[in-house]
Structures are given as structure tokens and as C-alpha cells.
Amino acid sequence: MTKKIKSIKQLNAEKKRLLQRQAELEKAIRYDWRDVKESLKPKYIAGEVIANLFNKTEQNGQDPLAAGLSHLAAALTKIAVEKAEEKVNEWLTKK
């Protein structure tokens, strides 16, 4: 527990120690509060969402980012094939 204070000198030393401890705790609270405010900024939240996308995997074990890129590549390939098909049809009908 705590020591019994037997003199004014001990009392003053304990007061000084407690004031230093209070200052340390108040500083820690300020830093924690600053960190909380920083974590609520939109850019930080967006960063967390992006980080979660990179870290999570879908149920089939594929990375969501890879799945998204795969779907994008498939869509672009489909468009390119359709355009190429139109060009070939135009070329064949001209002859």
C-alpha cells in the first residue's frame, strides 16, 4: 500500500511526486486524444479500408483486389473482341 507520511518534508516530496505523475498522465491523455482525432479523419479511414482490401481474402481464397482486376481485364477483353469482330465483319462485307 502507501507509506505513512511522518513529516512535512515527506508530505512535500509526495505532493511533488503526485504532481509529476499528474503531468505525465495529462500528457498521455493529450497524445491519446490527438491520436483519436487523427484516426477519425477521412484520409485515415480511407487508408484503413484500402489496407483491409489488401489483407482480406474472399471465400474462394482469391484476393479481392486480384478479383477486381480480373473482372476489369475480362470486361476490357470482351470490349476489344467485340470491336475486332465488328472490324472483321466490315472488312469481309466490303469484299
Image: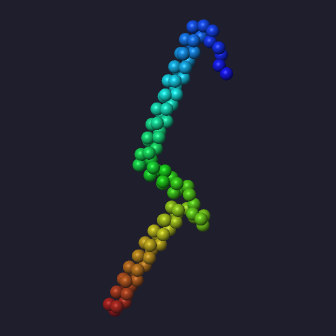
Work out which residue is located at the far left of the displayed protein and give it: 94
- Residue at image position (32%, 90%) is 94
Percent x, y for residue 58?
57, 63
Which residue is located at x 55 percent, y 62 percent? Answer: 63
Q: Quadrant of the N terminus?
A: top right
Left or right of 8? Residue 50 is left
> In the image, is residue 46 above or below residue 4?
below
Residue for point 65% across, 16% down: 3
Query: Considering depth in this image, is 84 or 20 the residue closer to the camera?
Result: 20
- At x 46%, y 32%, the residue is 30
Comparing 15 with 60, the one in front is 15
The figure's colour scheme reads: rainbow
- Residue 95 sits in quarter: bottom left
Residue 39: x %, y % from top left: 46, 44
Q: Position of residue 82 (x, y in %)?
A: 40, 80
The one nearer the camera, 16 or 59, is 16
- How many labels sit on residues? 0
